[in-house]
Structure formats: C-alpha cells, structure tokens
C-alpha cells in the first residue's frame, strides 16, 4: 500500500496553513521538491478549501480555537491532517489529538522526514476510510437483517404461517419484484404500521 500511496502523492491536492516565515517557506520548498500540488493559506481560515486531500496546519496554542473550528468536519469525510508544531508540550499535543491529526512535523522544518510523515499519515487515512466503509456495510446488513426479521414476524402473525414460510414469502416476492429483500421487508413493515394506525383511529 505504501508504494501505491507514494505513486499517487503528486495527484493529491494539498493545503498548507502556515505563516509565511522561514518554516513555512521550508515546508513549501520540501513539498515542491516532492512534486506535490498545493496551495498556501494564512491566516488560519474558517474552513478548509474545497476538494483538498491533505492539510498541513500550524498548531500553536494561541490559535487553538481557530484550529478546532477549522477541523470540525461534522459528517464530511475529513482530509488527511498533518500538524506542524514547535514542541511537544501537553497543551499542544492535546490540540493535535483533538483536531484529528494523523502525523506531526516539528519545527524547524528539516530536509528529511516530511515525506515519511506524509506517507504514514496518508496510509493511516486510507486505512480509516476502508474501516469506515466496512462498518457502514455491516451496519446496513444488520439493519436489513432486522427489517427482514420484523417483516417475518408480521407475516407469521397475520397469515398464521411458520417462520420458514414467512421467510420464503418475502424471498419469493422480492425475486418477483426484482428488489432486495430488505426493501420488500421495509414495505411490509410500513404497510403494517399504516394499517395498524388506521385501525386504531377507527376504533377510537
């Protein structure tokens, strides 16, 4: 995976959020040598630029509020975040952890180490995205299984059939309609709830 990530580094869109001082210039020079495509931003903006894959951000105690706001991605997929710091004091480390940085580069910026940190951070980011996809897939599968189980219960109760017969009913109807079983199960559940609601209204 590391070799694949290295090959695609030049395709990534990067944003450097760092003061244009000696370290900021050194960072930009190193990224230029690697061949990365990037844009520079200062002071710290309210949001990350659109379609950015990797962000290098200067993490300083006096900018903690701005940094935490900048890194509040909500439901959005966050970019690969790399923190640039002066020293490893507890307050700085806490900010680095809370903002979700996957790597940390210390100032002064040195000629070696930046590429390694970038590769490691991107590799961790890819792993996290893969894990998130697997979790979402499992959650959808579990939700579908629960829907089918509920729909089976409804059919068993209303049609006085066995669990296997209820399952076969759902399976055959889903096949005939060419839709997933959990979609059909959801329709059965919604129809049953609507009917139950109407009957309840009539009785009252």
Image: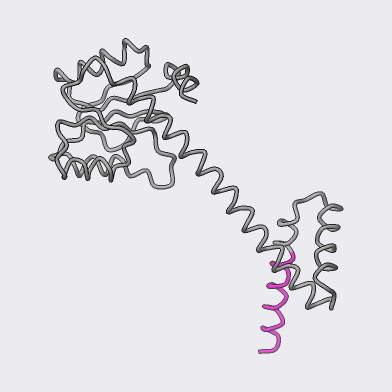
Q: Residue furthest bottom?
A: 204
Looking at the image, which residue is at 74% across and 73% down? 153
Prevailing SS of the magenta stretch = helix
Q: For residue 181, what is the image quadrant? A: bottom right
Looking at the image, which residue is at 32% across and 10% down? 33
Give the magenta part as a residue range. Answer: 188-204
In reply to whether residue 192 is colored magenta, the answer given is: yes
Looking at the image, which residue is at 40% across and 23% down? 13
**Left or right: where 70 falls relative to 2:** left
Q: For residue 68, what is the image quadrant? A: top left
Q: Residue furthest top?
A: 33
Q: Nearer the viewer, residue 85 or 193?
A: 85
**Left or right: where 112 falls relative to 80:** left
In reply to whether residue 114 is colored magenta, the answer given is: no
User: Where 58 sits versus 156, above or below?
Assistant: above
**Left or right: where 74 falls relative to 67:** right
User: Where 156 sits versus 16, above or below?
Assistant: below
- Picture coordinates of residue 36 (x, y %)? 37, 16
User: Where 68 sits versus 170, above or below?
Assistant: above
Q: Nearer the viewer, residue 108 or 72?
A: 108
- Picture coordinates of residue 44 (x, y %)? 22, 33
**Location of the C terminus (image quadrant):** bottom right
């Amino acid at each position: 995976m590391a070799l694949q990530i290295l090959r695609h580094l030049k395709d990534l869109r990067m944003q450097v959020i760092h003061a244009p001082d000696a370290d900021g210039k050194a960072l930009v020079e190193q990224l230029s040598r690697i061949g990365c495509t990037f844009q520079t931003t200062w002071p710290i903006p309210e949001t990350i630029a659109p379609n950015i894959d990797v962000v290098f951000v200067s993490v300083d105690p006096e900018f903690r509020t701005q940094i935490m706001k900048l890194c509040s991605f909500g439901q959005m997929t966050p970019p690969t975040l790399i923190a640039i710091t002066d020293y490893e004091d507890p307050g700085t480390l806490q900010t680095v952890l809370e903002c979700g940085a996957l790597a940390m580069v210390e100032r002064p910026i040195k000629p070696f180490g930046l590429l390694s940190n970038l590769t490691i951070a991107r590799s961790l980011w890819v792993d996290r995205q893969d894990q998130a996809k697997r979790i979402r897939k499992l959650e959808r599968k579990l939700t579908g299984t629960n829907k089918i189980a509920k729909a089976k219960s409804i059919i068993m109760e209303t049609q006085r059939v066995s669990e296997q017969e209820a399952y076969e009913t759902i399976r055959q109807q889903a096949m005939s309609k060419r839709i997933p079983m959990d979609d059909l199960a959801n329709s059965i559940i919604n129809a049953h709830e609507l009917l139950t609601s109407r009957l309840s209204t009539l009785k009252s």
